[in-house]
């Protein structure tokens, strides 16, 4: 037998299974299925007609625009083909995640051949006409893209942005004890930060109750125009890297298909048996030692099986095969001939019958029914999603007899609520956060569960560390990994919440962006079942980051959220506990959305009874009658607000204005559902023009005290009639180590600035209010001086409570 080391001199035979595993018939079947995949992948990129080359290839058979990526596709379909074999051999429940970007041809092809694609897209039949339709739609207007988009059956990882495949894979197997997620990591993708941290996910996997992830690092050597880092380090260094991450690596390396099939089959058998042994020891013997799961390194040529050279330049095994290896087939006859020879090299006449259907000897390799990876219900998680059991959120609220008197941490009762959610849902709800669960005042969840920890334990861990192998709180100081875990968890049918500091939620900006796009497309696919919403709790917010300083002051994530389609995103700014609980309850029940909840963890004044909070949150925007003086008449001034501290400062401003100008007619409006400021054409729950004009008037000054950057409010309201009279106060990048009030003064969201602004905006006060205005400026100076002298705010500011308006 020829050793694989004769193909790759760097190969170490002790890390590659060399004994033949496949019988001649099995090898024939595997290789035939893979050849068919490669033929289809090339056809997707090039062909608009003559799908099975039943006539000589002509220029008119070629697409006018050649789009797509060939380089990673043969490796992806090679792996898919071999996973089909082990699904049948071991009766596995498995899904497939393709990390390499633009790798869709290598996944679409086997999904089509196994029949899953035809089951959903019934015009893509298993015949010549269906194959042609399949080819024509690829990277074509009105068709499908070159990533494993939501339109791809079996996909939960898009791959358009690199780095998230491992975290998605681990998220998919948490609480799925029978599932194996086979995840392919591109060697370009392996250079990303999110991917590097995601390798550590194995430290959070419980073999007793979770499934398993089989990572396959695909080294084909090149990115779009550069070599990849991991493909150019020594075998020993790469082996040490993976062992350092906590894996047992196995290497399959070469280019000869027959040898590679044998090596891959033997290696996969060994990995599956190792996974089964790990799970058996944990489940049957109670072994809680952190296991070393297997991982595979597959080293194969870039663009495997494409033409060797073009114009004296290397193609196969080179970066030049990354995208479209032959770019001028319509302009250069010699390239058209090369393409014809390339396609014929797969011998389609041996693979497909006269009808254009894959011959049964190869088709039998694919599993049946739901065991096909394109039809596995875990990759369409809404099919297996169970409704979350929610206790009555009303029982966790605070008793508000008089507005603005009681101070409570807004997030603490939410933690109590989630404690009981976890108790009621012990297998399908998890809380995610980067080392901040207790910091964010959610620590009551520890009465129901602990933090997952499969690392070493020290004696002091018993004193409040809240660690346990079977915990349901996921903490790791990588927002990327946490977000990926949660996305994978949700897309496979479960529920959860991710809490994080406001300034650093930006770390997942692009992950949020990709998930929003995934949901938007999925909502348009009738076969994609509804999945639980992604719930983000943004806390430790800008207005209570006076102690951490400028680096921790950034509310701009809301601007990122508002850029996305209002079909899939929501922004909630509950002013108090009861509103937060009502909003959280709604979010936990929702599907196909990303809910962003902004609520600080510090103690804040409480304003609404539970019944009032429920009604207020259902409306999204409302007048607070008890803080208004315009009942029955037109107001002179609208004071609006969104956010906990902006609400407090706006309320304090109304008391100042009422004390100084008792006849001033003020209307106080609080906004909980931020996007409701938009019109219904933009947001389903948006205020109609009539309702907006009724609330905000068409000609009176509006002072809007906002949690975030002020221009976001202008973006949402620019089409409203009274926009010219809208004056927004918000964060203006004016911060450092301040007291809370000084930070508010610096950004002009404080009570004094609002009152001064009101005097300037209300015509009858511009002259009459001059004395009051001077007093307010003096108060700001006094507050600053006190803060600089004492390091805290004046007691009458810190201890301010709402006083009913006479």
Image (cartoon, grey):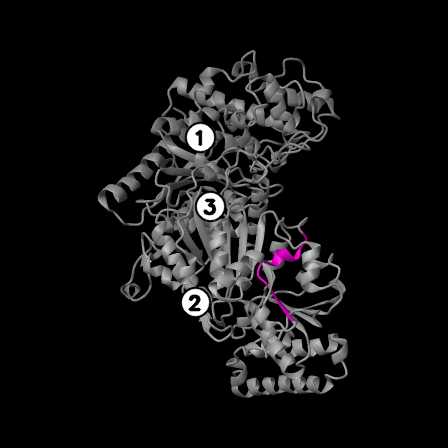
Q: Residue at x 68, y 48 (%)?
A: 681
Q: Is residue 669 magenta?
A: yes
Q: Earlier in the sequence, mark 1 or mark 2?
A: 1
* Mark 2 lies on residue: 398
Q: Quadrant of residue 38?
A: top right
The answer for how far apart the CA atoms under marks 1 and 2 are is 73 Å
Name the image quarter holding the N terminus. top left
In the image, residue 615 lies at what x, y percent? 53, 59
Foreground label between 1 and 3: 3
* Mark 3 lies on residue: 490
Q: Which residues are magenta?
A: 667-679
Tell which of 50 and 403 is nearer to you.
403
> Label 3 near label 1: C-beta < 8 Å?
no
Q: Is residue 306 visible?
A: no
Assign a secondary structure to mark 2.
Answer: loop
Left-right relation of 84 to 691: left
Q: Residue at x 70, y 21 (%)?
A: 61
């Amino acid at each position: 037998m020829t050793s694989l080391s004769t193909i790759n001199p760097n190969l170490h035979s002790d890390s590659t299974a060399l004994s033949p595993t496949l019988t001649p018939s099995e090898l024939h079947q595997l290789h035939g299925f893979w050849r068919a995949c490669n033929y289809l992948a090339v056809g997707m990129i090039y062909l608009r007609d003559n799908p099975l080359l039943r006539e000589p290839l002509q220029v008119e058979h070629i697409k006018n625009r050649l789009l797509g990526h060939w380089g990673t596709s043969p490796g992806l379909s090679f792996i898919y083909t071999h996973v089909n074999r082990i699904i049948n051999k071991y009766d596995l429940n498995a899904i497939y995640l393709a990390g390499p970007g633009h790798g869709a041809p290598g996944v679409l092809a086997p999904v089509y051949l196994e029949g899953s694609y035809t089951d959903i897209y019934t015009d893509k039949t298993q015949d010549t006409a269906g194959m042609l339709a399949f080819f024509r739609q690829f990277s074509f207007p009105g068709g499908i893209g070159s990533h494993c988009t939501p339109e791809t059956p079996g996909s939960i990882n898009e791959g358009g942005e690199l780095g998230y495949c491992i975290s998605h894979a681990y998220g998919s197997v948490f609480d799925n004890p029978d599932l194996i997620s086979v995840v392919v990591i591109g060697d370009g993708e392996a250079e990303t930060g999110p991917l590097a941290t995601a390798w550590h996910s194995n430290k959070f996997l419980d073999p007793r109750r979770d499934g398993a992830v089989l990572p396959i690092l695909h080294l084909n050597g090149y990115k779009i125009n550069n070599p990849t880092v991991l493909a150019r380090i020594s075998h020993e260094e790469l082996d040490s890297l993976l062992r350092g991450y906590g894996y047992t690596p196995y290497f399959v390396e070469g280019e000869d298909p027959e040898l590679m099939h044998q090596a891959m089959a033997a290696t996969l058998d060994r990995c599956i048996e190792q996974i089964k042994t790990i799970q058996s020891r944990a489940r049957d013997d109670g072994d809680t030692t952190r296991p070393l799961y297997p991982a595979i390194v597959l080293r194969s040529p870039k663009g495997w099986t494409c033409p060797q050279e073009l114009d004296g330049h290397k193609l196969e095994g080179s970066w030049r095969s990354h995208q479209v290896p032959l770019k001028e087939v319509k302009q250069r006859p010699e390239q058209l001939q090369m393409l014809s020879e390339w396609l014929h090299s797969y011998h389609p006449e041996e693979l497909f019958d006269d009808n254009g259907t894959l011959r049964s000897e190869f088709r039998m390799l694919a599993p049946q029914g739901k065991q096909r990876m394109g039809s596995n219900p875990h990759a369409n998680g809404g099919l297996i999603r169970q409704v979350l059991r929610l206790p009555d959120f009303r029982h966790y609220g605070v008793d508000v007899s008089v507005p603005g008197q009681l101070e409570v941490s807004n997030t603490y009762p939410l933690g109590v609520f989630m404690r009981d959610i976890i108790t009621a849902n012990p297998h399908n709800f998890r809380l995610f956060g980067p080392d901040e669960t207790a910091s964010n005042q959610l620590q009551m969840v520890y009465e129901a569960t602990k933090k997952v920890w499969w690392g070493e334990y020290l004696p002091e861990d018993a004193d409040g560390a809240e660690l346990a192998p079977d915990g349901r709180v996921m903490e790791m100081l990588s927002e990327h990994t946490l977000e990926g875990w949660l996305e994978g968890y949700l897309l496979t049918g479960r529920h959860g919440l991710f809490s994080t500091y406001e300034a650093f939620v930006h770390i997942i900006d692009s992950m949020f962006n990709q998930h929003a796009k995934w949901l938007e497309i999925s909502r348009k696919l009738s076969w994609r079942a509804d999945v639980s919403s992604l719930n983000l709790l943004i806390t430790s917010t800008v207005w209570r980051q006076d102690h951490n300083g400028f680096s921790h002051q950034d509310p701009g994530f809301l601007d990122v959220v508002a850029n996305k389609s209002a079909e899939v995103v929501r922004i909630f700014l509950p002013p108090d506990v009861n509103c937060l609980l009502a909003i959280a309850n709604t979010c936990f029940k929702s599907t196909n959305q990303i809910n962003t909840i902004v609520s600080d963890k510090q103690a804040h004044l409480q304003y609404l009874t539970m019944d009032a909070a429920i009604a207020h949150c259902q409306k999204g925007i409302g007048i607070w009658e008890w803080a208004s003086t315009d009942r029955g008449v037109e107001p002179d001034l609208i004071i609006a607000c969104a956010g906990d501290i902006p609400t407090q400062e706006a309320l304090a401003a109304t008391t100042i204005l009422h004390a100084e100008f008792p006849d001033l007619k003020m209307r106080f409006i609080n906004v909980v559902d931020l996007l409701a400021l938009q019109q219904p054409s933009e947001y389903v729950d948006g205020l109609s023009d009539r309702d907006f004009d009724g609330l905000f008037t068409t000609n009176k000054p509006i002072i809007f005290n906002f949690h975030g950057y002020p221009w976001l409010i202008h973006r949402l309201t620019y089409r409203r009639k009274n926009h010219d009279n809208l004056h927004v106060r918000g964060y203006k990048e004016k911060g450092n180590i301040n007291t809370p009030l000084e930070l508010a003064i610096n950004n002009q969201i404080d009570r004094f600035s609002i009152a001064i602004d009101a005097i300037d905006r209300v015509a009858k006060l511009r002259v009459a209010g001059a004395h009051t205005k001077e007093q307010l400026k003096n108060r700001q100076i006094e507050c600053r001086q006190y803060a600089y002298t004492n390091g805290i705010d004046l007691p009458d500011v810190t201890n301010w409570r709402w006083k009913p308006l006479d």
